[in-house]
Amino acid sequence: MRGTSSASSPARPKRVVCLEWTSAEMFLSLGILPVAVGDIAGYRDWVVSPALPVTTLDLGSRSEPNLELLAELKPDLIAGAYGYGLDQADFTRFAPTFNVPFYDGTSTPFKQAVDETLQLGNLLSRRNEAEQLIATVKASISMARTKLQPKADRPICVVSMFDDRHVRIYGGGGLFQDVMNQLGLINAWEGATNSWGFAQVGIEQLVSVGDATIISLDPIPAHVQIRINQSSLWNNLPCVRNGKVIRIAPIWPFGGLRAAERFATLVAAT
C-alpha cells in the first residue's frame, strides 16, 4: 500500500493542513510549513523536531479537528496518517487529501517512511528534497551505529511513562525496533506488541528485562515522576537499583524519518 491521495492534489501546495503529527513531521522535513496542525501544544511536547513555526495555527484536537477553522483556512491540501481514527473521505469536501500509511502492516515502519517520503516528494515536486532527507537520515543512523558499537552487546529497553504503575514499552513492529536493528542494538523486551509496535505493561513486568538499560522518553508529567521516585515497585527493579535508567528528550514513536534519526542520535549520545 502506498500513501493515498485524492484527485488533483496540488504539486506545490501553499496552504497545507496536517490533522495529526506524523504528517506534520513529514511536510516540515521537506520544507513545507503547514498553516495549521492538530494539537500544536502536544506536538511541541511529544514530537519537538522538526520545530513548528510560531505562526502555525492550532486545528484543535487530533481526534476532533475544528471543521469551522478548516473551512476558513481554505487549504489546498489536507494531510493525515493511516490508522489514527479519522476517515480521509470526511475531508475531501474541503481540499484534496494525502494519507500516510506507516502502520498498515504491509512493511516495516522505517521502509514505509522512506517509500512515503519519496512518494510525497513526487507529489509535491520535491523529489530532490526527499532524496536528500533520506540520505541524511541514513548517514546519521550509520554514524550512530559506529558510535554505539562498544555498547552493542548491552541490551536496552525503551519506554514511555504515563503513570507510576504502567509503562508503554516499545518492541517488534515499531519504528524504534527498526532503528535499533540498524544500530545493531539488542532490545531487552521480547514480549508481544500491538500493530503499532508497543505494549502497555505493569511496571512489575520490567523484571523480565533484568539488568538492561532502560531508555525513558520525556516528557514525564511532574506528578508522575514524583510518584515513580517514591515507588518501591520501581526502585526494586534490578535496572533501577543498578542505576541503568536514562532519560532522553521526546521522540515521536510513530513518526517518520526525522523521528528515526532523532532516536538514533539521542540513543547514541547516552
Image (cartoon, rainbow, N blue to C red):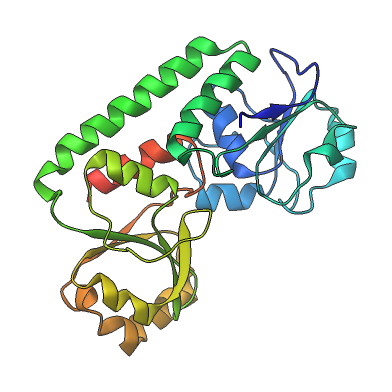
In the picture, measured across the screen, residue 231 lies left or right of residue 106, that is left
In the image, residue 229 sits, relative to residue 259, either above or below, namely below
Q: Considering depth in this image, is 40 or 251 the residue closer to the camera?
A: 251
Q: Which image quarter: residue 6?
A: top right
In the picture, measured across the screen, residue 211 lies left or right of residue 81, that is left
What residue is rendered at 34% in x and 42% in y? 179
Q: Which image quarter: residue 82?
A: top right
Q: Considering depth in this image, is 30 or 179 the residue closer to the camera?
A: 179
Residue 266 on image: x %, y %: 30, 45
In the picture, measured across the screen, residue 236 lies left or right of residue 153, that is right
What residue is rendered at 27% in x and 83% in y? 235
What residue is rendered at 70% in x and 12% in y? 11
Residue 123 on image: x %, y %: 65, 16
Q: Which image quarter: residue 101?
A: top right
Counting the numbered discs, the total is 0
In the picture, measured across the screen, residue 8 lies left or right of residue 120, that is right
Residue 96 on image: x %, y %: 80, 25
Query: Hey, which residue is sitting farthest bottom in the picture?
Result: 232
Quarter holding the N terminus is top right
Q: Considering depth in this image, is 57 or 269 the residue closer to the camera?
A: 269
